[in-house]
Structure formats: C-alpha cells, structure tokens
Amino acid sequence: MSSSEISSSCFNQETRSPSSPPLVEGSTVEQSRKEVDEVEEKPKDIIKFTAEKLAVEEVSRLVISPLCGAISLFVGTTRNNFEGKKVISLEYEAYLPMAENEIRKICSDIRQKWPVKHIAVFHRLGLVPVSEASVIIAASSAHRAAALEAVSYAIDTLKAKVPIWKKEMYEESSSSWKTNKECFWANNK
C-alpha cells in the first residue's frame, strides 16, 4: 500500500478524526459520552490549615471535575521585601475554629454568587520562607469567568475577615505581627 493509500484509508468520508469508529446510536463511544454528561458530582469545599509546604498541583487536582472546563488558582507567596525592609520569612498563626468557620462562609458566599463546582482553600501556618506559598485557593467551574471571579473574591475576603495573623521577620532582626485585615488594607491603599 502506498503512503497516499494509507493516509486516505485512515479517514472516513465523514468529518472525524483519523481511524475513529462510526458513531452508531447505542455504541460504546456514545454511551461513554452520555455517562460523562450525566455525571452528578456533589460540590466540595476543601479547607486545610497546615505547617507543611503547600503544593499547587495537589490543590489543583482536588478541584478537577469532568463537568468543568476551568480551574482558577491564586497562589500567595512570601516576597523578600515589605515597605523597604528585607523580609527573610513570614510566620502565620490562626484561631482555627473561627478561621475554618469564616472560610466555610466564604465558600457559601461564592456558591451564591457564581456557579462553581469545587473550592479548595489551603493556608500555611508557622514559618513560610521567601518564595514559598502561604495560601493557595482553587475553584473549578464550567466556564472561566466564574472560577476567576470566585478566586479573586475568596482571597480578598479571606484577608479581610479570617482571623489569621502574620509576623514578618526582617533581616535587621525586627519583626511585627499583623492581622490579615491590616495587611490587606496596607497593601491596597
């Protein structure tokens, strides 16, 4: 068989991908498409506070859904400077029962405003060195606008309302504790 015969024999006369089977009602391909379309997943809110290093891939994987075409992520990292001072690390503390409750409220608010499927909010506690993630927020939705807006709302509201305190460690040995709200307003004047 010549190369032109091989390439033309791989395509059907209908417009489909090479070597794809004919679409027949009741076929396995059609059944598997129906199964994906009919999948009913219960929405998940995953909230985690940890002293462990945060992994973007892990958080992203938790919000994947076959019903969604978008996953939006926000990753907040420790930068090496603040108001002209050299930062060597941050330290976070939280009042966990209240912090978890406030994040659940944020998730609930998001679900009332946007059609998202899954939401994950991970926040690091303890020391967070420069360039490491202190917070990762992820949301999945059918379309990108809802996921993007949900994640933006989540980080802004988290910083304004959740009882998390941040201590900045500076190279010159001084440090200061701030609430998330103080940090949010100071950085967004």
Image: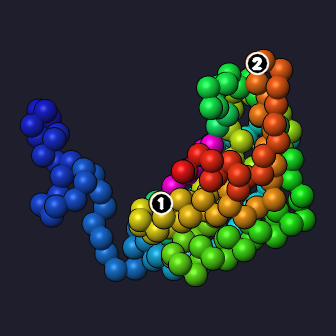
Q: Magenta residues?
A: 71-76
- Spot occupied by residue 163 in the image (x, y as percentages of width and height): 81, 59
Q: Does dot 1 land on a helix, a strand or a loop?
A: helix
| Residue located 62% across and 66% down the image | 118
Q: Which mark is residue 148?
A: 1
**Residue 12 location (% of width, % of height):** 17, 58
Q: Is 38 drawn above or below residue 12 in the view shown?
A: below
Give the farthest residue toward the top: 172
Residue at point 89% right, 59% down? 96
Which quadrant of the view contains residue 88? Answer: top right
Residue 78 on image: x %, y %: 67, 34
Majority SS type along the magenta span: strand
Q: Nearer the viewer, mark 2 or mark 1?
A: 2
Q: Position of residue 180 (x, y in %)?
A: 73, 52
Note whether 60 is above or below 63 in the view shown: above
Question: Is 112 situated left or right of 122 in this image?
Answer: left
Q: What's the amino acid at mark 1?
A: Leu
Specify whether residue 49 is in view.
no
Q: Amino acid at mark 2?
A: Glu
Q: Is residue 185 visible?
A: yes
Residue 47 on the magenta segment: no
Q: Are marks 2 and 1 in contact (CB under 8 Å)?
A: no
Judging by the rendered image, the residue that carries numbered circle 2 is: 171
Q: Quadrant of residue 170?
A: top right
> Tag count in the figure?
2
Q: Residue at x 16, y 48 (%)?
A: 9
Residue depicted at 64% across the width and 52% down the height = 184
Instruction: Indicate the quadrant where residue 157 lies.
Output: bottom right
